[in-house]
Image (cartoon, rainbow, N blue to C red):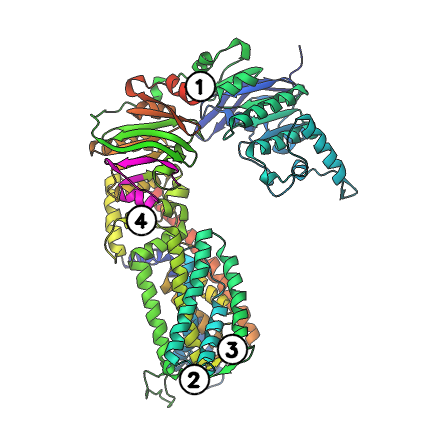
Amino acid sequence: MQQPIFWLRNISKTFPGVRALSHIDFDLYPGEIHCICGENGAGKSTLIKIISGAYQPDAGGTIEFEGKACSLTPHSAMELGIQTIYQEHTVFPHLTVTENIFAGLEMARGGVINRREMRAKTEEVLAYLHCDFGPDDNVGQLPSGQKKMVEIAKALVFQRKVVILDEPTASFSVSEIDMLLDVVKKVASTGLAVVYISHHLDEVFRIADRVTVLRDGEKIITCPIGEIDEPQLIRYMVGRDASAFYSREYFEPGEVVLEARNLTGNGVKDVSFTVRRREIVGFAGMVGSGRSELMTLLMGGAHRESGELLIFGKPAHIKSPADAIRHKMCYITEDRQHTGLFLKHSIARNTIVANLVNTKEKVISPRVDIRVADDYIKKLGIKARDARMPVMNLSGGNQQKVVLAKWFHTDGEIFIFDEPTRGIDVGAKQEIYQVMMDLLRQNKAVIMVSSDMPEVISMSDRVFVMKDGRVQGEIHRADISEENILQYSIGGSKV
Amino acid sequence: MNGAGKKSLFSRRGDMFTVVVISIAFVVLVVIVQLISGIVSGNVEYPSFISPLNILNILMQVAGTGILVMGMTAIMIAGGIDLSVGMLVSMIGIFVAKSIKDWGIDVVPAIILAILIAVAVEAIMGFIISRLNVESFIITLGGMIAFKGIALLICRSQEVTLNQNLEFFKTNLIEGAKTADGLSLMLPIYVIVFFVITAIFWFVLKYTKFGRRVYAVGSNPQAAYLSGINVKRIRLLTYVFNGLCAGIAGVLILARVNVGTISLGQNLEIDVIAAAVIGGVAMSGGKGSPMGSFIGVILMGAITNAMNIMRIQSEWQYFVKGLIIIIAVAGGALSAQISARRQLKRIQEP
């Protein structure tokens, strides 16, 4: 039996309040393609960050590389021959392929760069990988599939031993995926070990030698790909404690308030759905499946190429968020600090800002703003000294409530919550759920985008599952389950 | 009770706190220095620095700059900057002078035309900055250089001296008022124009929808857009208003100097930006107020004035002005940090 090139034993990683990984064993052999599968938040990213040296594991675990115990830093990992290729491109768009590959590691003689030799090496590797671009091409002008290949080529040029690919095919076309998978296989055939992370199970089955499944920070299984099939793999990925779920009250849904017909644009393709009063419509899917893009499109933040949007039964021409607000829509974004709040400004300023679209008064007194904000501080239980306090100085949960106040003040009817409880603690989560239920009681409609599986399952009346910008399926309350959602969101074969 | 009330008053006006403190400190310092030197020379008298005559003098010196500071305040609160105002003032001044003197245009049409030109060129720059979302620093830097070229072309690099055609703006509103020692006091119309423009900016930024939106755009354009604000239009409008200010300031500065020359607005943008920053306007946007900027520009004028009174050479004036800018900004940041920490503590101990 061959020696593993890389061996993690009993690795745990704890962040304040969260255990991201617990007691993971993971090994990797030269020449193999090892896939890691798991839902959002299963611990995949944490694991690869430990392999690449970006995170240090908790005490108690050991890491062996080529039989020798070591501790990894990003620098030492690179020296050992571990290369991580992240989801986002880390190329230099203004440089050529050769310059990108040798960036920071130029071949030089006496301080003078040896262009010819670098170019020759690059050419050799590109030819071996059958890439249809040359060493002198400008990387910025290559399509995203080929940018990824430049990074893979780098691993070959420097004869790396381990390559980690994190979601390499996100936003790729079918032909680009085929090309990339071929290249990955070829790279592995030279004896490199490949760690491959993907949400697309069909890719996993096409290239993996072995697969490891993570769930909630624990390793469920590692096995050769031949010993497992897709439904079984999904079963390993799901399965949770009942305690993770919430029980909510259900109401009789009212009339349709929003109807999307074949919406296309902003990466969203041909999406149709309806939303009724007194119901929560969930949007599930993997990160990057087009859910936030769909919400941006609904709010007029992106150009709608085709399709129709009906609000309260009438066609709505929404070209900007201002139009959307006039149509009684509210968008509680996923990133409150960057897209929801004016951190330096007072609670009062933040509260009134979205409703400026609707206000008829030309002259508004700051005193009125404060009175309005004081009202919401009481109603929503915002913990603050007074309405003049900058929201910067509030806690996360209270900041989220200020975002809610801003939208409640617009008298909206259709509330879009994008990842409403990300990064807030359990108590504040319950309060947000309570707010959603109150909205339903007041006859409003709620759209909820969430990557938190228990949240989607326990809060939604209906769930639409998205993948690659399309709605893969609609699941009704009685049928909502992790298996169903995962089947639609990552299942390759069934649609 | 009283103390607590005062404290919250200051923390509420956090933006202006620093400039108020520095201004008071500066005035007190100069008065003390004057009194002491009076005692030393055995000739104690009322400190000339805070005499009505001198205060009116300061106002006359800063009025033109002050109008520009108002436009700059709006632009900077919305997250932009305008480096071209100095050269725009020169261009407008030369244009008006040339129109009246050599091109035979009457005074009133010349002024109206000049202001329209200023608004137009600022609108063009504002349009490019807001639509293409490019750095306002670079675009207005280009504007500054181009305006200089145009100004020099118009006057063929020569000075254009007027025959007191713009005397109207210097009309003394308190004709006949005299100090105890018989010097006549001056309050020209252009100082009143400065006050009126300040009041308008203060009102618009504080009490109108547009004002709220300017602050929101500067603080977080992304969130502003998603809150239904037309970010591009707000940005564009701040430049249009600034064009109005620059046009008016150009005419008034020309009226005061009576000579159309490139040096009318030379390096003025630096003083304007400095005054706004001292007054509490943040370079990063979203913060500041016309009142703070008003105090800021008067403080800048007062520094120059005090040093002239005390016969300190001009080289030192640069040094002190620079130092005060640094103190104002660093002090502002420090007091903001302290008040944030205090607020945090207050929340933690319920």
Residue ID for mark 2:
B44
Of the pair B51 and B77, the residue shown nearer to us = B77
Disc 1/disc 2 C-alpha distance (Å) = 93 Å
Q: Residues within 10 Å of mark 3 (few under 14, many from 20)?
A: many
Q: Looking at the picture, do discs 4 and 1 lie on one chain?
A: yes
Relative image position of residue B50 (x, y in whole percent): 39, 78
Question: Which residue is label 1 attached to?
Answer: A491
Residue drawn 42% across the image and 43% down it: A338
* Disc 4 to disc 1: CB gap under 8 Å: no
Q: Nearer the viewer, mark 4 or mark 1?
A: 1
**What is the chain letter for disc 4?**
A
Which residue is labeled 4 in the image? A353
Mark 4 residue crowding within 10 angstroms, few (<14) / some (14–19) / many (20+): many
Secondary structure, mark 4, is loop
Circle 1 marks a residue in which chain? Answer: A
Circles 4 and 3 on the same chain: no
Chain letter of mark 2 equals: B
The 10 Å Cα crowd at callout 1, few under 14, some 14 to 19, many 20 or more, is many
| Residue pictured at 34% horizontal, 72% vertical | B195
Res. B296 visible in picture: no
Q: Are marks 4 and 3 in contact (CB under 8 Å)?
A: no
Quote the CA–CA distance across marks 3 and 1. Answer: 75 Å
Find residue B261 and name its label: 3
Q: Are marks 3 and 1 on the same chain?
A: no
Mark nearest the camera among 4 and 3 is 3
Kindly report the distance in space between the C-alpha atoms of the residues bearing marks 4 and 2: 57 Å
Comparing labels 1 and 2, the label whose residue is closer to the camera: 1
> Is A325 contained in the magenta span?
yes
Q: Quadrant of residue A295?
A: top left
x and y, in percent, of residue B315 in the image: 57, 74
Label 2 element class? loop
